[in-house]
Image (cartoon, rainbow, N blue to C red):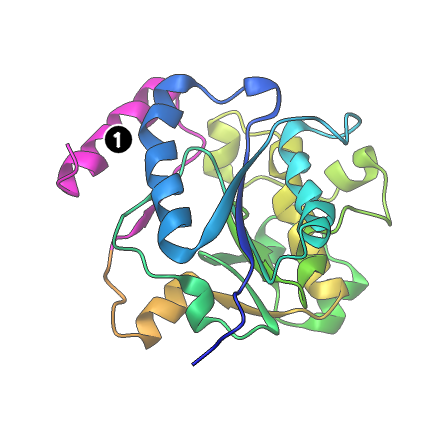
Amino acid sequence: MWQKKVKKTIYTLNTNNFAPKEITDITYPLLKHYAYKIGADFVEIKERKFPEWTPTYEKCQVYQLGQEAQNDWNIFIDYDALVHPDTPDVTSHLPREMCAHNGSDMNSIRWKDNRFFQRDGRRVGSASWLCIASDWTIELFKPMEDMTPEETYAQIFPVSHELQSGVEPRRLIEDYVFSYNIAKYGLKFDTVIDIFKRLNVGQAAWLWHIYAVPFEEKIVQMRNIIRMWGLA
């Protein structure tokens, strides 16, 4: 039976080639395999478009790139995330009216309150290393329109362990912007963790990502995960 091909793109961020090769040598083969497995294009975001913001804010380019590509699904995965080869196509289990992250926090822990968070009531705190949005929910990636960079940074309060690791408010900018967009636009939201639970694979360790750790420690942990998965 003929079925329209679903257009998907997996994006990752590597502006000005800042991603260490020691990491991408590990992660990119897995990301590219996942793209091939689910029938998605793989695109590195390489150029700065928002130089007045911090580099990680460039994830917001997906808002324009996804529309230009006429994607049905837009998937952003950080360059230092590990994706197990057995990971299923999450978009096959996510309704088109939903967007998703791997998980989420309660946003009052990190963000200053505002009328959108209050009105929305769900208090979704984005974890933007893995973001999924369809063409219906592309506003997840929409650049901030309501505040300047400095005004936005002032809304962010890293938690204690982040502060101890040297995480400044600007380091969490895209987490804040995506949380803001979910509330402002009333986007329907799910998490990959909950999707896997509903599929009765809640303990499947298919996705891995850490931050706020020294580079050397991250490399060690990544290699340990690869060995645990039986891939090395």
Q: Which residue is mark 1?
A: 221
Please, what is the three-letter code of the amino acid marked with disc 1? Gln
In the displayed structure, 150 sits above or below 192; it is above
Residue situated in front as seen by the camera: 140 or 6: 6
Picture coordinates of residue 46, whole percent (x, y): 62, 27
Picture coordinates of residue 74, whole percent (x, y): 58, 54
The residue depicted at 57 percent of the width and 69 percent of the height is: 189
Instruction: Please identify the quadrant where the N terminus is shown.
Output: bottom left
In the displayed structure, 125 sits above or below 190; it is above
Picture coordinates of residue 181, whole percent (x, y): 72, 58
Occupied quadrant, residue 153: top right
* Mark 1 neighbour density, 10 Å: few (under 14) some (14–19) many (20 or more): few
The residue depicted at 55 percent of the width and 47 percent of the height is: 128
Answer left or right for 71 relative to 155.
left
The residue depicted at 21 percent of the width and 36 percent of the height is: 226
Magenta region, residue range: 205-232
Residue situated in front as seen by the camera: 71 or 63: 71
Q: Is residue 208 magenta?
A: yes
Residue that protrudes farthest toward the front in the picture: 2
